[in-house]
Amino acid sequence: MEALSDLNTFAKILTDKGYNGYFHTQGAYAGKLKDSIGEYLESCQKGTDSLPKQDLLLTGYLQWSGEDKPRVECSMWVQYLNGKFSLNKMEVAKKDRFGQLLKKSELTSLSTITAPKAMDAIASVNDEQKQKAGQSPKRFRL
């Protein structure tokens, strides 16, 4: 079992892996990874929110090119235990401009250390094999 990390270490490891965009913790508290989780925990201490019985859910975009373009979304399930964090599961999904799922990759039995870099996660759902359209086999001319 992976050693649990404090918030600073957890956020630094994931940020260094390229997860440096904006996230939502439990569907609210938008901000950078550390800020989003920190605001959520602060809200729990004030009594505005309550800690979940299971994992924290972090959601965000790994790739965004505008509303009219496909995007890559990331969901992370993070275990929170006595002020320490550990990544359990990650889901990366490519969706079209209407929100329809194009391709999904689910990674389980993860740890903060074994999580893929953001670029590798994006590559797992991007189809880089583009068809060579309009190329026909060479023909002999007489």
Image: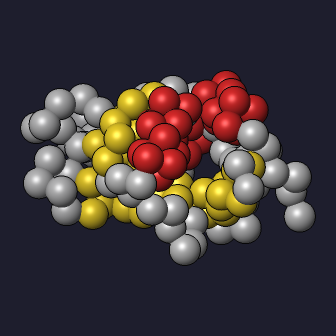
Say left or right for 20 vs 88.
Answer: left
Display coloring: secondary structure
131 versus 31 height, above or below: below
User: What residue is at 17 percent from the left and 30 percent from the top?
Assistant: 66
Viewer-nearest residue: 128 or 74: 74
Say left or right for 58 vs 72.
Answer: right
Name the image quarter holding the C terminus.
Answer: top left
How far across and down, in percent of the image, does residue 54 sit? 57, 72
45 versus 78 height, above or below: above
User: What residue is at 81 percent from the left and 51 percent from the top?
Assistant: 4
115 versus 100 height, above or below: above
User: What residue is at 65 percent from the left and 68 percent from the top?
Assistant: 108
Viewer-nearest residue: 26 or 137: 26
How far across and down, in percent of the image, does residue 9 sit? 75, 32
Say left or right for 99 vs 46.
Answer: left
User: What residue is at 41 percent from the left and 54 percent from the top?
Assistant: 47
Name the image quarter holding the N terminus.
Answer: bottom right
Say left or right for 87 vs 97.
Answer: right
The answer to whether any part of residue 75 appears in the image is no
The answer to whether any part of residue 102 appears in the image is yes
